Amino acid sequence: MEWWVSMPKIELHAHLNGSIRDSTLLELARVLGEKGVIVFSDVEHVIMKNDRSLGEVFKLFDLIHILTTDHKTVTRITKEVVEDFASENVVYLELRTTPKKNDSIGMSKHSYMEAVVEGLRAVTAVDIDFVPHKFNTQDSLNSIAMNDACDGTKKKKIYVRLLLSIDRRETTEAAIETVKLALEMRDLGVVGIDLSGNPVVGEWNTFLPALKFAQEQGLYITLHCGEVLNCQEVQPMLDFLPQRIGHAIFFEEEEWRQLKTSKIPVEICLTSNIKTESISSIDIHHFVDLYNAKHPLVLCTDDAGVFSTSLSNEYKLASTAFGLGKKEMFELARTGIEFIFAGDEVKQDLVETFDSAAKKLN
Ligand code: 5GP
């Protein structure tokens, strides 16, 4: 097995509906095609298309949501996505998703999230820990050692925590509803809030009351920040002091300075940035600047399904493009532990997992 696959990894920026297997999407499309809800042949090439602009990506998400937004399917894709990450030795996953309402099938934001949690419960291929320890009464779930999980001698184990996404199309009230739901579901592994959705839609001030409320209530926060050129937003987002930000592409000089001083960790999604042409070539990716400045950063997939990637692939890509060796990449993965939205007990367990894997690195 290649080292970028076998080494333990931490995934902190993965959107549930962007991480679905193509085979599952095609199967779902075929079923809806047979029911006459969509025309399969029209949809097939959209799903299989490889390179898309950022605008096209959001059109694809509208299609994906038509295919996936029912309780049974949400449960299925959650299970599959977790098992796929675990199969490439992701040992800690923060999975984010936008709670959805669909009155025509009796779906509320709450029932959507219950279907997600059901998907976590349905994971069988690996041992999963998704309930924060202070809420967990089932000791057995958390007592399985992760050491050696990557060498095949024990069943693999993955920690999963959930982030609820606020979509930039939403109103202040809808965003507050999502934060309230996150607070209600803390005992089921919801640890934070993400702000995402089409970056050319919506305004920061619309989401600020909900994000402030989340911050006051002690939820962790990560923001999609600087995905497109928007002089109004980056500064207030950095002033807000989220625990992490995603992407950080279109920053002015002063904003770079502020980011570096603040030490806010950045979730870097290389393939996503290149495929959407947010960055024209990997040689000029800001990974290099941030890495050289020892700024906290973590490699992530964004949408492994939509961008046909995997976390292993992101590590391989960074290694090749930036001339970093196995050891440097391993250390980069390990530093991700510091930026996870989980407590010291989980961090300590992950440190032991990485220590154990480090002994077998050569
Ligand atoms: P979901 O929240 O439905 O599980 O995952 C898909 C959603 O995540 C998309 O509809 C969009 O709101 C958000 N998303 C996925 N990828 C990106 C991205 O690259 N940038 C932004 N801003 N949002 C994204």
Image (cartoon, rainbow, N blue to C red):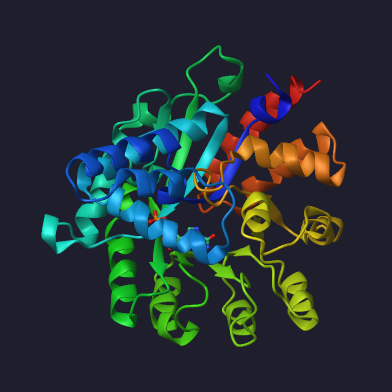
Is residue 69 depicted above or below 241 in this figure? above
Q: Is residue 105 left or right of residue 355?
A: left
Q: Residue furthest top?
A: 153
Q: Quadrant of the C terminus?
A: top right
Q: Residue at x 28, y 38 (%)?
A: 30
Q: Residue at point 63% right, 80% down?
A: 234
**Residue 255, horizontal then vertical, whole percent:** 73, 79
Regarding residue 186, the answer to whether it shows in the image is no
Above or below 55: residue 349: above
User: Does residue 211 appear left or right of residue 79 in this picture?
Assistant: right
Residue 206 location (% of width, % of height): 41, 84
The image quadrant where one finds the N terminus is top right
Q: How many marks are shown on the rendered structure?
A: 0
- Nearest the eye: 38 or 63: 38
Residue 63 sits in which quadrant? bottom left
Please state if 50 lies on the left or on the right of 262 as rendered.
left
Tell me if I can see residue 202 in this picture: yes
- Above/below status of 267 relative to 177: above
Residue 243, image x, y percentages = 57, 65
Q: Quadrant of residue 310?
A: top right
Residue at image coords 74%, 41%: 317
Observer-nearest of 85 and 354: 85
Along the viewing direction, whichever of 42 and 266 lies nearer the viewer:
42
At which x and y percent is residue 284? Answer: 82, 60
